[in-house]
Image (tube, coloured by chain):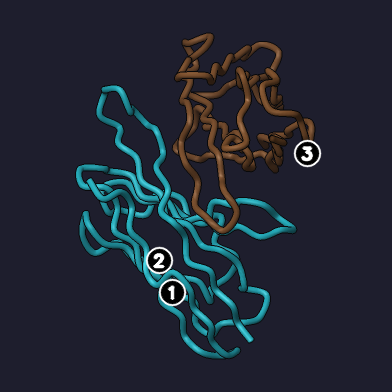
Chain colours: A brown, B cyan
Amino acid sequence: KQEVTQIPAALSVPEGENLVLNCSFTDSAIYNLQWFRQDPGKGLTSLLLIQSSQREQTSGRLNASLDKSSGRSTLYIAASQPGDSATYLCAVRDNYGQNFVFGPGTRLSVLP
Amino acid sequence: DAGVIQSPRHEVTEMGQEVTLRCKPISGHDYLFWYRQTMMRGLELLIYFNNNVPIDDSGMPEDRFSAKMPNASFSTLKIQPSEPRDSAVYFCASSSARVGRHYNEQFFGPGTRLTVL
């Protein structure tokens, strides 16, 4: 059974720092991996989707990488801003269907 | 497109009452998912549909929960009878398996916050 973990659980950084969020999964037979952000009391906003054949995806200040063999993905946020404060979740879709397994999330606070 | 639409946004009900949550997926999407989010268990997939057909309902907690998708633009999640432990935020999401920029990318609705007293 696929399990997804995220480290750290919470992170507080000053504005302007570059930072890395980590996502690990136990079964490397994945179809794709998706990163989301969730603001308090809100739904999930899709940030990046990496297909299993890809190594990374970029969108603006965000870069997500995927290493299937080691069961890891990282989300890199460049030049962090207070508006980046949110919970970031990764979700892994397995090869057997459309089942997405979510990690517990990393709660990010960017201090002005 | 307006995105995934859910209603109601908030629901407060008493134990034993029937609760119906509604979802309108993004037009053209052929997959629809129902999730539940709690502090203790995080986000859990309850059920998903492909072309209006339920594919996997193994995440549905018990027989009190049921979901339907009568057409491509509407789905319901029903709890009958509701219990306090059902209190959570329920999300609906949709995706498309058509090859393209958003191939199999899930888009979430704003959620329904359910409180069962």
Is B77 or A83 nearer to us in this picture?
A83
Badge 3: chain ID: A
Whole-number angstrom distance, CA of label 3 to CA of label 1: 34 Å
Residue A75 drawn above or below residue A44: above
Q: Amino acid at mark 2?
A: Ala
Mark 2 on the same chain as mark 1: yes
Q: Amino acid at mark 1?
A: Lys
Q: Amino acid at mark 3?
A: Ala
| Identity of the residue drawn at 62% across and 36% down | A82
| Identity of the residue drawn at 29% across and 52% down | B25
Identify the secondary structure beneath mark 3.
Answer: strand
- Asked if disc 3 and disc 1 are in contact, CB closer than 8 Å, the reply is no
- Asked if disc 2 and disc 1 are in contact, CB closer than 8 Å, the reply is yes
Mark 2 on the same chain as mark 3: no
Residue B54 picture location, percent across and down: 37, 54
The residue indicated by pointer 1 is B78
